[in-house]
Image: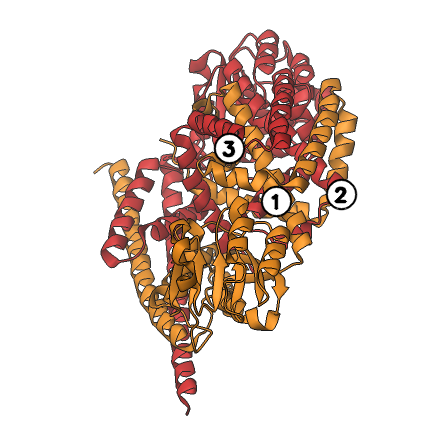
Chain colours: A red, B orange
């Protein structure tokens, strides 16, 4: 046996040991999943929320400390546990969720066949509420569907919200809550307050209907009328794992003009530009680092989704349009600087934006570094 | 003891069992780290590359199969193993790297005090090459530093590359390789070919100097002169874990005009816009889902970095400027559509871009969904 053969045998032996360690890891995950299921049964019975921040923080702190003592990277351990816990949050709802109301009221989802409507219907059902769906074709027998309803949730495209709310006017039981899940809040709230004299609740789920669970998802709520009567809906959202963030409707709409209308609009323009230039995407990706792939992916993902949804979000948003017009002015300024090759002006503007971001610039750099490392973990170069 | 107390005790018991499982996980990681160190010693001795795609693929496939058999999510197992392996790649270089050349030549890093220069100097040293640094103040004794050099790597800002290469003209040993690591390739290659009659190699590392290791990082190479003589440098990069992608200099520069000049320019404009609008970032983040936080983070991270570096990349890039001018035209078109609220035109353009992305749109949606789930894992709502 040559020296090389011996070294090769030793390497094979070490790799087999790694495989054995990884195999034990999978066994541990199976054991942990069983324990989490058991905990899920307890939580359902007692109504403890799926996501308990304090428990999660304590668990992570204990394992980080153990990692440091064992000479293992505490960041590695935290990353692994967070990923494992994500899986657990999905599993915890398997046995249903606790119902806030001991005496369940019927819940009507208007637009219950759409993506968000189906998600809400499923969550309410799994929490023991009788759920009825009112779709486009169901209006002839709407009164029967609305009879005795305790909560009516309007889950239809933005452009149709006002019309649907108007059709509900005067048809809801007096104590029934009228709620919506539209991505703008001022106009829908005004429409709901005009259509219904009882409790009114504006909601904006900051996620799409394909999320595996509501754990760590944000739902923004903009008060309408009678918060005491609508509180149980927010409690139910929290039991499903969501974080409820409160904001006045006008501040919500202003923030959304930035994070939705303007952002989607500029992404739309960027996509139009790449397509019109007929950029050689395959070559660009082959020569790129994960950060470029991620940035192009964030553009491409928009176009894999529903054009109508994005037309709804972008078009008809007056504040978004005004922001986009001023974006055009700033682009013109920056292009002027680019044409002149003015390094000093570039640095000055750069420094101004940096100062405006303040400490968040460094926070964002660190955060995105973590994500980019995760993106790189998945890269396969063959 | 009440029923509630009993249930509470049972929950505490289950949580203690989870903690025990997590504790065993940390022990396994410590054991795995020891094995990886041992493998690292073998690889250094035998010169096996740090990152072996086939071994990684086989390892993942075996554990995914075991996971399916055990009723554990195979995606969960793969995510965990990829994260664990990232840590391993960093650890494998601890004992140095194999040197491709049995008879090591002196390596001179021009600009060796900069970030990328320091990274390269460190890697060459850890692989057993004598490393010399030629910095701004060292030019009076440059000839002594260059004496007998086998590889000279120019690692200075783009704007200075041509000048530095000119200063090296006629001073390198005949068989010495002249290489650069600038983010553009046509002009630096032309300058190097004019300055040196021996082997020439254009490199563009697609990562910053702060990467923990070169595993899974891309280095683009654009041939200069005498590929047989420069091959060992590419082999050395592969041993450090990098993937070497070849491209002609003009195609490289065209791709970089898109992924660097245009992309950084539009990000710069977006940051200018947010700052000029004085957007309430704290509120926007509180009301946002992880996708918006990630998008703003990708903007903010630019401004946490060196203004001079980005001025270098954006300004003076003629192709990038032309792309930016045409981007302005497309923005004007899209704004016109926005003003008119033209849903049909929006959908038509949207569909056109979608068709252009082709299958990649769905690939990007899936990829970014994975990353967004990872971003959400780290969210702390208190």
Q: Is residue A256 above or below residue B190?
A: above
| Residue picked out by circle 3 | B296
Callout 1: chain: B
Instruction: State the residue at coordinates (52%, 17%).
Output: A201
For marks 3 and 2, the one nearer the N-term is 3
| Residue picked out by circle 1 | B259
Which quarter of the figure is the C terminus of chain A placed in? bottom right
Would residue B202 be found to the left or right of residue A164 on screen? left
Element assignment for label 1: helix
Q: Is residue B344 visible?
A: yes
For marks 1 and 3, the one nearer the N-term is 1
Callout 3: chain: B
x then y, percent, for residue A328: 65, 23
Q: Quadrant of residue A244?
A: top left
For marks 2 and 1, the one nearer the N-term is 1
x then y, percent, for residue B345: 78, 28
């Amino acid at each position: 046996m040559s020296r090389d053969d011996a070294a090769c045998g030793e390497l094979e032996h070490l790799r087999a040991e790694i495989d054995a360690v990884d195999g034990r890891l999978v066994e541990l995950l199976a054991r942990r999943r069983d324990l989490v299921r058991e905990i899920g049964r307890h939580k359902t019975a007692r109504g403890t929320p799926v996501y308990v921040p304090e428990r999660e923080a304590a668990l992570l702190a204990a394992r980080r400390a153990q990692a440091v003592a064992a000479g293992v990277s505490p960041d590695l351990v935290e990353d692994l546990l967070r990923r494992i816990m994500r899986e657990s949050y999905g599993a915890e709802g398997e046995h249903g969720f606790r119902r806030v109301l001991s005496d369940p009221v019927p819940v009507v989802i208007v637009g219950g066949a759409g993506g968000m409507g189906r998600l809400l219907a499923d969550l309410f059902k799994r929490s023991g509420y009788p759920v009825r769906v009112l779709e486009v074709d169901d209006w002839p027998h709407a009164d029967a569907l609305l009879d005795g309803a305790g909560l009516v949730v309007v889950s239809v495209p933005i452009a149709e919200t006002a019309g649907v709310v108007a059709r509900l006017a005067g048809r809801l039981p007096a104590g029934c809550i009228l709620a919506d899940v539209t991505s703008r809040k001022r106009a829908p709230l005004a429409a709901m307050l005009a259509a219904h004299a009882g409790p009114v609740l504006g909601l904006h789920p900051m996620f799409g209907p394909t999320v595996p669970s509501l754990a760590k998802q944000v739902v923004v709520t903009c008060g309408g009328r009678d918060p005491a009567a609508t509180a149980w809906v927010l409690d139910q959202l929290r039991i499903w794992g969501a974080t409820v963030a409160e904001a006045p409707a006008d501040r919500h709409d202003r923030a959304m003009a930035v994070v939705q209308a303007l952002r989607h609009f500029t992404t739309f323009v960027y996509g139009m530009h790449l397509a019109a230039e007929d950029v050689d995407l395959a070559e660009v990706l082959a020569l790129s680092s994960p950060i470029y792939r991620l940035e192009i992916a964030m553009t491409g993902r928009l176009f894999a989704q529903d054009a109508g949804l994005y037309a709804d979000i972008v078009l008809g948003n007056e504040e978004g349009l005004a922001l986009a017009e001023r974006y055009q002015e700033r682009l013109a300024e920056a292009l002027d600087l680019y044409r002149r090759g003015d390094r000093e002006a570039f640095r000055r503007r750069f420094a101004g934006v940096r100062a405006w971001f303040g400490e968040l610039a460094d926070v964002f750099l660190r955060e995105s570094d973590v994500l980019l490392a995760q993106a790189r973990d998945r890269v396969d170069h063959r």
